[in-house]
Amino acid sequence: MAATITGGAAKVATDAVAAATGTGNAAGVSAVSGASQVAHTGLALVMDGIEYFITVPMVYLSVAFLLVAIAAKLVRSFRAGPPPFQLALYPVPRHPLIASLRDTFGMPQILKIEPLFWFFLVMYHVGFLLLILGHLDILSGINLVPPESRHMLGAGAVGVMVTLPTFYFLGRRFRDANRVISTPGDYLLLLLLLFLFLFGDLMSWGNSWTASGFVMTKADFARYFDGLASFSFADPRTVLHGAHYHFVVIHVLLANLLFITLPFTKVVHAFFSLPLNLVRRQPWKES
Amino acid sequence: MEGILSPAESAALKELFEKKLNGVMRMYLDTCARCGICVESCHVYASMPEVKYTAVGRAEVVRKIFRRYFRMQGRFAPWLGEVLEFDEATLNAVYDAAFSCTGCRRCMVHCPFGIDTQQVMAIAKALLIGADREPKVLSMLADMSIAKGEGIEETRADYAQALKNLEGEVKAIWPVPEGTSAIPYEAKEADVLYVALAGSHSIVSAAAIMNAAGEKWTLSSFEAVNFATFVGDSGKAKRVAQRIIDEATRLGVKEVAVVECGTAFRYLRHMIGPQKFRVVAFVELIDRYIREDRIRLDKSRLPESVTYHDPCQIARNSGIMEEPRRILRAISDRFVELRPNREENWCCGGGGGLVAMGELDFRMKSSRVKADQLKASGAQIVTTACENCHSQLSDLNEHYGLGMRVEFLSHLVAKALVLPGERFRR
Amino acid sequence: MADYETKKTLDYKGLKCPMPIVKISQELPKVGIGDIVEVLTTDPGSLSDFPAWAKTTGNQVVETRQEPGLIKIYVKRLK
Ligand code: SF4
Ligand code: SF4
């Protein structure tokens, strides 16, 4: 079993883990999540069902949908054929591919025109990549952060890296011309992301920056993720205890919603930026 | 509801839209993040700040139609993307977007994804043609070009006579040996087919320069400009260009040199696919003559300070940027750059057919930044390499009282030509 | 060379592309059907442009005359 690292809170958490895996004592469980021990009836039972649906089957469905829809979109766009003539801009850079990569990942145009926006964009996109990494890290097979750690990757900082810029992006949408060009969908997408991040922050900040922690540790989440990865269809409720559980469910729900809507939003720029920048930088071969 | 098109009309427009949806276009329509980076790029917005005059503002009109007819949200949540139906108001917005855009592609330089608003506007223009709302003057000019191609045999002799009458003006700049033509026409064994415009100003200086360089050239029967591209009719544009392709092929020339006209050059250089000949801009030819020492130029004839306006279709959209600068440095010690310049130069504001359409009031208001930029250069002469830019710059010069002189690059070069044995300053 | 009365003389000398054609298409409707206007120009291209334009718009170029430095085109409004 994991060693007690930071006193009481960790001890409790470790106990919870132990309890869930059946190696600890039953008292540990009731101490942490007494509420869950009460037999559910009526509405509570319905809620349990909904929460189970959100945290397990819906996750599979939305991830599958995301992959299929994105693939379909890519195939459709790439198979629709080339434009009638080449659309490059001049002067042509010496290495068009490198220039396109630079455009895509460095966004030099934005740096020049709106440096603050660029700063937040870079922070956000780097944060987003770390976020994906941080979630993968939860799987027990990957351990960038020690499995027994209370923290997840970045100890809450990654959450800040995406949350702060999202606030900025949202505020920016209300400014000048940006307000006029923004559609309701643009605001909704940002709000969805914002709430998704805030609930995520609640977990990671709670674990990292409060004395008692978020109660659920990386190891707890690992059990949930491993369950998903192994298609065990186990109810995460059995490994994630406490009243905070509902926050986890909301976080997962928002993530599911994002997965489902993402292929229909401008987030597809993640896939189209490089091809489009190549169109701009690489002229067709002259005859 | 009032103003809504009949289902058949809508369906026809939808079909026209769909024809334009190549892979890149689909990505242009799906990718825009509405980040607003392109807002300040457009000279129209920079001169008269209304969001409908930004690149993204224009493209959104087309995207809102796209979302309505080609995206699921158009059916399930139309309010999400504020979709537009085909109706009177939409078509008016489409017109405003398309024909207030000069197709300069300055916005494409700044967009982080490189979205080509001129391409997105190509959809708008196709829809307007479908709805019979395109600017009639542009289609009339395109039709004229096509009819000219069909009837050329009937007018060829008159044209040839007019060229003969013009030879004196060419010889006044550069004499040719007795018995040779100063404006070769239908010349077999020519290496270069020079495609001019209707006006003698597009022929005389160029002829003198090519004669001075000892070029084996011949003049085209046709005007280089392609008004069908302005109106957005790709079918007609092909037919207009085909006249020149056929002529060049028949004469067996190695190169087609395009007069100082941006649209003509970009179309022939980049949009007609591989041919048996190369397409060069006339400024490229001048630059080549200078570098090969085939013409000599006297710097002392141009004492004024001079700047250069990069025509959008020749510079950022076709890559001719250093040639005109080398030429200007060969005829002047007082060349100054406009700021910004090259691919970031402000559009003159006359592109996209606006000059032909008249639109003087809009052209002047929407190009205030251009006038400011010209004034800030402090130059006495502004040169350019595009007929359309020249017209617009002349109008700006007058309207804003800039007190400059607007010149074609080729005219300044012709004036600087040094005759054999003449003394000159390099 | 037929003799005819011209209603109007339009001076298009030295205009830039495509102004002569744009202008004639605006000016011709101002004279009566059957009337003839005289266009003065220096553009060699006009000798093919005007007939082609007339054909597409249903009007007629009745005659062209030229001398060094000047081209005269006689356009008859038919529509
Ligand atoms: S810069 Fe590009 S992505 Fe941003 S709003 Fe303009 S067109 Fe859209
Ligand atoms: S192409 Fe030029 S005129 Fe059109 S939106 Fe872009 S910057 Fe403006």
Image (spheres, rainbow, N blue to C red):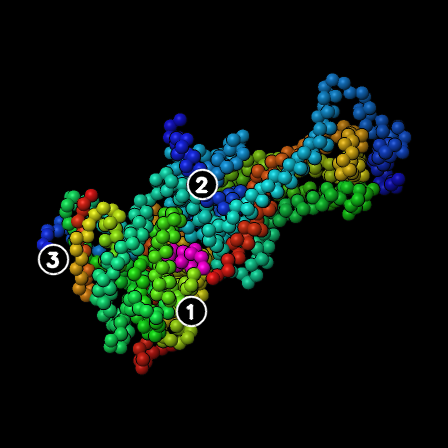
What is the three-letter code of the residue carrying label 3? Met
- Left or right: where A30 falls relative to A66: right
Please report the bounds of the magenta region as a residue range. Answer: B260-274
Residue visible at 16% across and 51% down in the picture: C37
Q: Residues within 10 Å of mark 1 (few under 14, many from 20)?
A: some
Q: Which numbered disc covers residue C1?
A: 3
Callout 3 crowding tier (Cα within 10 Å): few <14, some 14–19, many ≥20: few
Q: Residue at x 80, y 32 (%)?
A: A239
Disc 1/disc 3 C-alpha distance (Å): 52 Å
In front of the other: label 2 or label 3? Answer: 3
Q: Which residue is mark 1?
A: B326
Numbered circles on residues, count: 3
Q: Where residue B375 sits in the image (x, y, percent)?
A: 37, 58
Classify mark 2: helix, strand or loop: helix
Look at the image and say whether residue A227 sits in the magenta stretch. Answer: no
Residue B8 falls in image quadrant: top left
Q: Chain of mark 2?
A: B
The verdict on residue B269 being magenta is yes
Q: Chain of mark 1?
A: B
Q: Are marks 1 and 3 in contact (CB under 8 Å)?
A: no
Does any atom of ligand 2 lie closer than 8 Å to the CB of label 3? no
On the image, numbered disc 2 is attached to which residue? B17
Which amino acid, mark 2? Answer: Phe
Amino acid under disc 1 = Arg
